[in-house]
Image: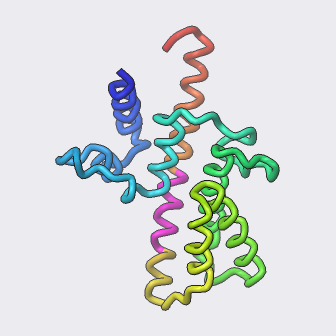
């Protein structure tokens, strides 16, 4: 029964254009055995966590930076999204200061280690000290800007859906 409800929820999200055709294809490919979250973009993962997994929103909500003292699983998921959006805000700029970069890296590292375990600390350290060639840098900037556009559109749609659901609940419908 839960699989049917999840499918209905996802289909509604697709009809409302919260999920893109590409994301729908990743969730429901021609060969069901080829579904893998490894290939999901961060925005799709966030939509799934908020809708299908029915996680409880952190105290600050999904769309605001979590409170520093809130180290819950949900707050860390929202924190990763917040970090991504913060970095997306710098995607069209050439650089950030070393101090800002180090601060971002430390905050992200701490959150990722809490979510995934200590083994991610070494991977984060490696990423922090890795040099990027200009061609790859441009490619990553473009990806970040694309994710930002998708994230903004989906955030707006999710807020509309949340508002509509609350209104329906107030009237005793659903």
Magenta residues? 142-152
Q: Is residue 173 left or right of residue 87?
A: left
Residue furthest right as drawn: 69
Residue 120, given in percent of the width and then of the height, sits at: 57, 67
Residue at 58 percent of width and 37 percent of height:
159
Q: Where is 99 relative to 59, above or below?
A: below
Q: Is residue 90 left or right of residue 21?
A: right
Q: What main secondary structure does the magenta stretch of the protein show?
A: helix
Residue 158, given in percent of the width and then of the height, sits at: 53, 39
Q: Is residue 15 left or right of residue 98?
A: left
Residue at 62 percent of width and 57 percent of height:
80
Residue furthest left as drawn: 30
Q: Where is 10 relative to 39, above or below?
A: above
Q: Where is 19 relative to 12, above or below?
A: below
Residue at 59 percent of width and 29 percent of height:
163
What count of labels does the image hold?
0
Identify the coloring. rainbow
Residue at 73 percent of width and 49 percent of height:
71
Q: Is residue 6 left or right of residue 99?
A: left
Residue 42, given in percent of the width and then of the height, sits at: 49, 56
Identify the image quadrant of residue 98.
bottom right
Q: Where is 160 relative to 92, above or below?
A: above
Residue furthest front as drawn: 118
Identify the image quadrant of residue 72.
top right
Quarter holding the N terminus is top left
Residue 163 colored in magenta in the image: no
Residue 145 colored in magenta in the image: yes
Q: Of 169 and 133, which appears nearest the observer?
A: 133
Residue 152, given in percent of the width and then of the height, sits at: 55, 52
């Amino acid at each position: 029964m839960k699989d049917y409800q999840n499918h209905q929820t996802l289909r509604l999200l697709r009809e409302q254009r919260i999920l893109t055709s590409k994301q729908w294809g990743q969730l429901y490919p021609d060969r069901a055995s080829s579904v893998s979250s490894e290939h999901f973009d961060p925005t799709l993962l966030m939509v799934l966590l908020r809708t299908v997994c029915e996680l409880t929103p952190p105290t600050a909500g999904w769309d605001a930076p979590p409170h520093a003292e809130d180290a819950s699983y949900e707050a860390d998921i929202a924190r990763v999204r917040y970090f991504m959006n913060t970095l997306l805000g710098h995607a069209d700029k050439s650089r950030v200061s070393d101090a800002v970069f180090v601060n971002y890296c430390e905050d992200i590292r701490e959150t990722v280690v809490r979510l995934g375990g200590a083994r991610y600390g070494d991977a984060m350290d490696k990423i922090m000290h890795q040099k990027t060639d200009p061609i790859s840098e441009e490619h990553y900037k473009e990806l970040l800007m694309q994710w930002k556009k998708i994230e903004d559109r989906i955030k707006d749609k999710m807020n509309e859906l949340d508002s509509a659901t609350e209104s329906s609940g107030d009237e005793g419908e659903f």
